[in-house]
Amino acid sequence: MNKWLSCVAVLFLFGCASERVVLLPSPEGGKSAVVLRDANGEQELSQPYAASVRRLGLSHPYQASAEEVQARYGATLEAMPPRPVSHVLYFVSGADQLTEASMVELDTVRRLLAERPAAELVVIGHTDTVGSRESNDELSRQRAASVRAMLIEAGFPADKMEIAGRGERELLVPTANEVDEPRNRRVEINIR
């Protein structure tokens, strides 16, 4: 009898196991969706807090509320790392000197990094197409190194930063050779 009861209890527990999916709102306010598949076909969740519980292989959709999600998953959501962000800084032609507007943007990056002590950075330098490939490779590395030095000076740990120079290989604005394009003279800072 006890063996039979144990088997029924195990089957009951496995039979009650469920999988829950909740679509969280996009932090940027954009649209997002997730498609779930089960034996009955596909189901799309496309509204914030749209949810589905899968039991016995079948999905059962419902609309959760922000309060319900916070009550159920608040601790988990709080423990998640911040979303990765990117910032772009622009440079004076032919130099590793930031433009005035980018000096202001650099202050924004510094403040953000102060709020994210465990952040890791990838700093990637770029150039326009003026000059040789070799000189642009070197200039792009100098730009990345210059931004790295400014961030280290602001207190960000050097060992949490990688730098790279891409020269004129990844133009933001496609141009012919020897074109002075300010938007291509940049450093991208990817913060994760």
Image: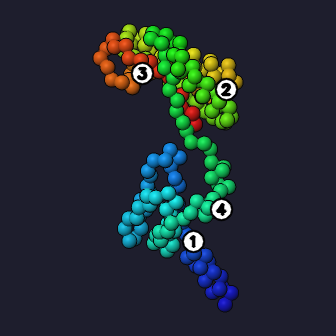
Q: Which residue is mark 2?
A: 156
Regarding mark 4 in the picture, which secondary structure is present there? helix
Q: Nearer the viewer, mark 3 or mark 2?
A: 3
Out of 47 and 127, give the one closest to the viewer: 47
Q: Amino acid at mark 2?
A: Phe
Residue farthest to the left, as pictured: 176
Q: Which residue is mark 3?
A: 183
Residue 3 position in % (x across, y down):
65, 85
Q: Residue at x 57, y 33 (%)?
A: 191
Q: Earlier in the sequence, mark 1 or mark 4?
A: 1
Q: Earlier in the sequence, mark 3 or mark 2?
A: 2
Residue 169 position in % (x across, y down):
38, 22
Q: Dots 1 and 4: beta carbons under 8 Å?
A: no
Q: Amino acid at mark 4?
A: Ala
Q: Amino acid at mark 1?
A: Ala
Q: Dots 4 and 3: beta carbons under 8 Å?
A: no
Mark 2 neighbour density, 10 Å: few (under 14) some (14–19) many (20 or more): many
Which label is found at residue 71? 4
Regarding mark 3 in the picture, which secondary structure is present there? helix
Mark 3 neighbour density, 10 Å: few (under 14) some (14–19) many (20 or more): some
Kindly report the distance in space between the C-alpha atoms of the residues bearing marks 4 and 3: 45 Å
Which label is found at residue 17? 1
